[in-house]
Amino acid sequence: MDTPTFFTDRDLGRRVPDALRDAGFTVERHDDHFGPLTTDPQWLAEVGRRGWIAFSHNRDIRYRSQERDAAMRAGIPLFFLIGHAPHSELASNLITTFPRVIQFLQEHQPPFIAKIYRPTPIADVGRRPGRVQMWLSETAWRASTGG
């Protein structure tokens, strides 16, 4: 089995991908491949062509139909890090929660959009994993768009 490549969008800055790399994961950052004017649909399509697994903190992708549909058409697994938190906290939670992310990837066929939550209480970030929850499956997306 090939080692998966993970992609972090611009909203996750440098701290999240750097922490993932330090933890031993193969990670590509948005700014290493795309310019500042690249639209979400453009990078989502390219991430899909490359077969990468995407992480984002960008609420627009979840709530705007053009971006959401682009993610689903790209055929990617897309995970949203949920919560207003510093990037260091988002990174710590993602690393601690990574076994659940991998399990989710094994149990669900892309495309999908899932959410990664921090543990409750928030004080446990980095000590306990958060949860991973399906937000939009391909079946639900097709039903909602008439496709």
Image (spheres, rainbow, N blue to C red):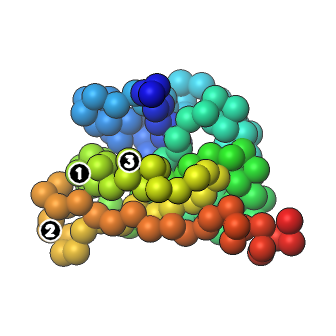
Return the residue nearer the eye: 37 or 72: 72
In the picture shown, does residue 94 fall above or below 42? below
Left or right, 77 with reference to 120: right
Q: How far separated are the C-alphas under marks 2 and 3?
A: 24 Å
Q: Label 1: few (<14), some or many (≥20) within 10 Å? A: some
Q: Earlier in the sequence, mark 3 or mark 1?
A: 1
Q: Which residue is label 1 attached to?
A: 96
Q: Can you say which quadrant of the picture contains the C terminus?
A: bottom right
Query: Which three-letter amino acid code belongs to the residue tagged 1?
Result: Thr
Which mark is drawn over residue 145? none
- Residue drawn at point x = 46 percent, y = 50 percent: 105
Q: Which residue is label 2 attached to?
A: 123
Left or right, 52 with reference to 105: right
Query: Which three-letter amino acid code belongs to the residue tagged 3?
Result: Ile
Residue 63, given in percent of the width and then of the height, sits at 65, 68
Q: Earlier in the sequence, mark 1 or mark 2?
A: 1
Q: Label 2: few (<14), some or many (≥20) within 10 Å? A: few
- Residue drawn at point x = 69 percent, y = 71 percent: 140
Query: In what element is the residue under mark 2?
Result: helix
Quadrant position of residue 141: bottom right
Which mark is drawn over residue 102? 3
Q: Earlier in the sequence, mark 2 or mark 3?
A: 3
Callouts 3 and 1 close, C-beta under 8 Å: no
Question: In this rendering, does residue 133 appear at all?
Answer: yes
Question: In this rendering, does residue 10 appear at all?
Answer: no
Left or right, 16 with reference to 146: left
